[in-house]
Image (spheres, rainbow, N blue to C red):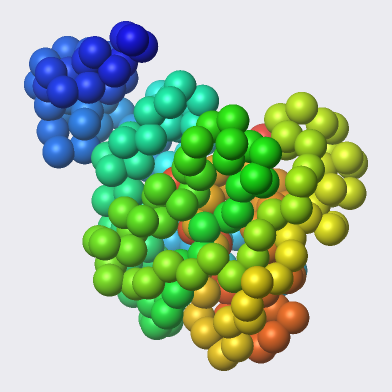
């Protein structure tokens, strides 16, 4: 059994493993040290999306936390992470004076990766966000078989993404929030948004963490 599976129900902080546990699954110190982003939209190179938002900068210890969600078989970490993204989304939409979305669309995982991992971390986050915010989930797209993102170079990733998503059903006229765990270049969420916007709709992108460009660090 994985160490963290043994720790999972014993009241330890996910990050430092001390006892003092908040609802977030973290101790007071680790919670206070999280690299939060200001409650404003991220200014990115948006093409198909209206705004991006994220709760955290993609730095330690958030990197480690998300890594455990994705690769160390700890899907229940999404329960701890989602409330912080929900709160950030509410603040950003209030700041921008725009309506919250009608629909949450988790970034699809390829079938092959779903089979190896057993879950889609974006869907887990979306499930929690849906419960917290009362916004339904739809999965109108499926991801075609593709090379794992972290194994291929940037150009290969872009080539893959061009044809990565296939329609199941259109979301005409909806306000949509795409949900992913991390936004780096934004290529994935833009590719999803471009596919969604083959019918008229408004698309935003929400992620737990955002990789800050070098000049802003
Ligand atoms: Zn801690």
Question: Does residue 215 appear anywhere in the picture?
Answer: no
Seen in the picture, residue 166 relative to 114 is either above or below; the reply is below
The residue positioned 21% from the left and 37% from the top of the image is 24
Residue 213's image quarter? Answer: top right
- Is residue 121 found left or right of 152 in the rendered image? left
Residue 101's image quarter? Answer: bottom left
- Is residue 54 found left or right of 167 in the rendered image? left
Seen in the picture, residue 1 relative to 158 is either above or below; the reply is above
Seen in the picture, residue 14 relative to 205 is either above or below; the reply is above
The residue positioned 33% from the left and 10% from the top of the image is 1
Residue 48: x, y in percent? 70, 71
Residue sitting nearer the eye, 169 or 200: 169
Question: Does residue 134 appear anywhere in the picture?
Answer: yes
Seen in the picture, residue 43 relative to 76 is either above or below; the reply is below
The residue positioned 60% from the left and 88% from the top of the image is 172
Residue sitting nearer the eye, 47 or 95: 47
Residue 42: x, y in percent? 54, 57
Residue sitting nearer the eye, 1 or 173: 1
Residue 72's image quarter? Answer: top left
Residue 170: x, y in percent? 63, 81
Residue sitting nearer the eye, 217 or 25: 25
- Is residue 70 found left or right of 116 in the rendered image? left
Residue 19: x, y in percent? 11, 16
Q: How many marks?
A: 0
The residue positioned 52% from the left and 74% from the top of the image is 176
In the rendered image, which quarter contains the C terminus?
top right
């Amino acid at each position: 059994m994985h160490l963290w599976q043994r720790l999972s129900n014993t009241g330890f902080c996910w990050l430092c493993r001390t006892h003092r546990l908040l609802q977030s699954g973290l101790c007071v110190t680790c919670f206070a040290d999280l690299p939060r982003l200001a409650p404003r939209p991220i200014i990115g190179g948006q093409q198909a999306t209206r705004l991006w938002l994220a709760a955290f900068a993609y730095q330690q210890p958030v990197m480690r936390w998300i890594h455990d969600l994705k690769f160390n078989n700890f899907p229940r970490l999404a329960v701890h992470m989602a409330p912080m993204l929900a709160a950030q989304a509410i603040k950003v939409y209030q700041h921008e004076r725009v309506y919250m979305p009608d629909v949450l669309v988790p970034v699809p995982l390829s079938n092959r990766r779903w089979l190896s991992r057993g879950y889609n971390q974006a869907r887990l986050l979306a499930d929690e966000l849906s419960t917290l915010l009362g916004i339904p989930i739809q999965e109108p797209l499926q991801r075609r078989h593709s090379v794992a993102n972290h194994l291929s170079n940037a150009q290969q990733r872009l080539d893959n993404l061009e044809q990565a998503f296939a329609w199941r059903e259109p979301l005409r006229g909806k306000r949509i929030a795409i949900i992913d765990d991390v936004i780096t270049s934004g290529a994935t969420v833009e590719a999803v948004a471009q596919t969604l916007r083959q019918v008229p709709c408004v698309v935003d992108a929400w992620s737990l963490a955002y990789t800050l460009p070098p000049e802003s660090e």
